[in-house]
Amino acid sequence: MLNSLTSGRRLALRLLLWQLVAAMVVGLAFSVRGLRWAIAAVAGAGIVAIGTALLSTRLFSQVNGAGMALVRLMTGMLLKWMVIVGGLIIIMFQYKLPPLAAITGLVTAYAVNLLAFRFKG
């Protein structure tokens, strides 16, 4: 076994914290455009962080073998994408927040994914 569940949990927690930091940074950057832009940016990055939290809690909750791990991964990914798509629909259509800021927040949170897995440190 190359990685233990403990190291996976630590990586997921670190990723979640970095996504929340990125949400605050992108919200601060969009605050020059106004409060609605900042809220949209934080919400866009925040839904990615919520999806990551759901995925990681689903994936690392129990160990029952490789088959169950794959099922947990797939259901966690499905939950994550349901949260992201549903969150974007709510942000853009129900609250009518600026889509550019929401999508920029979403992309920023996903860029953190690339950095977190690049530098495992």
Image (spheres, rainbow, N blue to C red):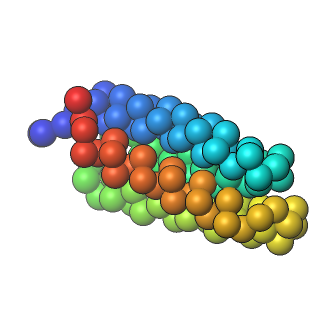
Residue at position x 35%, y 35% in the image:
11
Residue at position x 46%, y 55% in the image:
110
Locate residue 83, reporting x and y percent. 64, 59
Q: In this rendering, would 95 be left or right of 26?
A: right
Residue extending farthest right: 95
Residue extending farthest front: 32
Question: Please, is residue 83 above or below residue 17 in the view?
Answer: below
Locate residue 5, reporting x and y percent. 29, 34
Residue extending farthest left: 1
Quadrant housing the C terminus = top left
Residue at position x 34%, y 42% in the image:
116
Q: Does the rendering let one see residue 1? A: yes
How many numbered badges does the structure rendering display?
0
Q: In this rendering, would 67 be left or right of 81?
A: left
Locate residue 17, reporting x and y percent. 50, 32
Q: Classify residue 97 by image quadrant.
A: bottom right
Locate residue 20, reporting x and y percent. 57, 37
Q: In this rendering, would 61 be left or right of 80?
A: left
Quadrant housing the N terminus = top left
89 or 65, which lies in front? 89
